[in-house]
Image (spheres, helix red, strand yellow):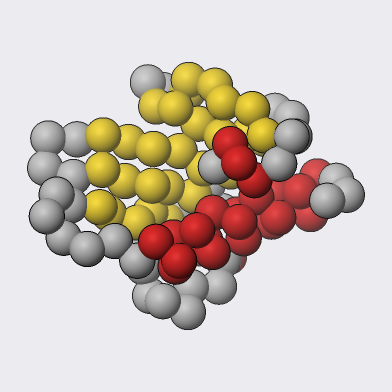
């Protein structure tokens, strides 16, 4: 997430590393005993052609990563970039 652009900063929010543009969060990583989540604060509005997103909340979605299971790195990177661009648009930031 940090590699998306120079406008990305990382903060700790509710105990999770969270990627922000300005003060607006767009993604986080949560580590748990059996898996890790890569989450998106506005994930429900993201296109997800690879079908990676999980969750049923009004806005948030996440990708669950489990040890020993393959990761669709291209699909995940596409979601991360889309979330970054989405938050820029919500803030009316240029690329």
Residue 44 lies left or right of residue 92; in this view the side is left
Q: Position of residue 57 (x, y in %)?
A: 41, 56
**What residue is drawn where x is 74% and y is 34%?**
6
Residue 64 lies left or right of residue 2; in this view the side is left
Q: Position of residue 36 (x, y in %)?
A: 26, 43
Q: Quadrant of residue 30?
A: top left
Q: How many marks?
A: 0
Q: Quadrant of residue 9?
A: top right
Q: Quadrant of residue 3?
A: top right
**What residue is drawn where x is 49% and y is 49%?**
40
Q: Nearer the viewer, residue 3 or 10?
A: 3
Q: Position of residue 62 (x, y in %)?
A: 38, 54
Q: Is residue 91 above or below residue 63?
A: above
**What residue is drawn where x is 14% and y is 49%?**
67
Q: Is residue 6 visible?
A: yes
**What residue is drawn where x is 55% and y is 73%?**
47
Q: Is residue 59 visible?
A: no
């Amino acid at each position: 997430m940090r590699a998306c652009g120079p406008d990305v900063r990382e903060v700790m929010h509710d105990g999770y590393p969270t990627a922000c543009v300005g003060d607006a969060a767009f993604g986080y990583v949560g580590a748990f005993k059996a898996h890790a989540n890569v989450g998106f604060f506005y994930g429900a509005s993201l296109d997800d052609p690879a079908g990676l997103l999980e969750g049923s909340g009004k806005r948030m979605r996440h990708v669950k990563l489990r040890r020993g299971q393959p990761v669709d790195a291209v699909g995940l990177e596409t979601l991360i970039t889309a979330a970054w661009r989405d938050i820029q648009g919500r803030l009316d930031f240029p690329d």
